[in-house]
Amino acid sequence: EDQVTQSPEALRLQEGESSSLNCSYTVSGLRGLFWYRQDPGKGPEFLFTLYSAGEEKEKERLKATLTKKESFLHITAPKPEDSATYLCAVQAGASGSRLTFGEGTQLTVNP
Amino acid sequence: NAGVTQTPKFRILKIGQSMTLQCTQDMNHNYMYWYRQDPGMGLKLIYYSVGAGITDKGEVPNGYNVSRSTTEDFPLRLELAAPSQTSVYFCASSYIIAGVNEQFFGPGTRLTVL
């Protein structure tokens, strides 16, 4: 069974204080790992897809990396508008088109 | 493009009532999905469809039904609503690039069953 665990559950940062969110996964044959951002009362918004270990992707203050067992979402010099819940999901070869989601990390950035 | 749209945004049902949650996408995606999200939890897959006329169960299908008669629409039917179905429901659609599935989500329907 595919499993995704995100940590920490919640993270509170000061504006400008860089940090990382973790997504650990156990799947059979990873096809893709996805990061989403979810604002309160909204649907998840797609951020990144990572396909293989060693891959990195960046968008503004966010950088996602992938190893064979986990992914990190690095947030550099965050701003209050980066406050949101960040969800990680995996697609395994045996699952076809289905994704397995983690429970998310709730990030709060204080001014 | 409007992307994925869902109606209604909010709904309160009494136990035993039925309703249909609507989902439409205008991106010509073949794949569509229904998820539920409970407070502090991740998304759980209810049903999904790989194309018009083809649907399959996800992780938590009990108490729900779906149909897919067109590429654009994927309604979710709740029969005999129960308090355990109180949740936020998200519809998503996707295309497949090199076998990898990037899903795009609607704004959600917040359902309360009393």
Image: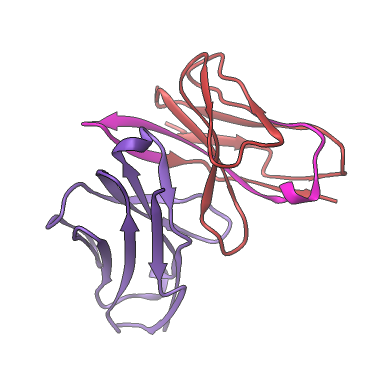
In the figure, is residue B7 to the left or right of A14? right
User: With respect to residue A88, does B62 lie above or below?
Assistant: above
Q: How is the image coloured?
A: by chain
**Which corner quadrant of the image does residue A15 belong to?**
bottom left
* In magenta stretch: residue A5: no
Principal secondary structure, stretch drawn in magenta: strand
Identify which residue is drawn at 24% across, 61% down.
A69
Chain coloured red in this rendering: B
Identify which residue is drawn at 33% across, 71% down.
A21
Drawing shade for chain A: purple
The magenta stretch is: B76-103
**Which corner quadrant of the image does residue B96 belong to?**
top left
Identify which residue is drawn at 56% across, 25% down.
B74
* In magenta stretch: residue B83: yes
In the figure, is residue B85 to the left or right of B38? right
Identify which residue is drawn at 47% across, 30% down.
B32
Rendering coords of residue B81 (x, y %): 80, 40
Rendering coords of residue A99 (x, y %): 40, 43
Of residue A4 and residue B18, the one placed in the foreground of this image is: A4
Rendering coords of residue A20 (x, y %): 29, 74
Of residue A46 and residue A51, the one placed in the foreground of this image is: A51
Quadrant containing the C terminus of chain A is bottom left
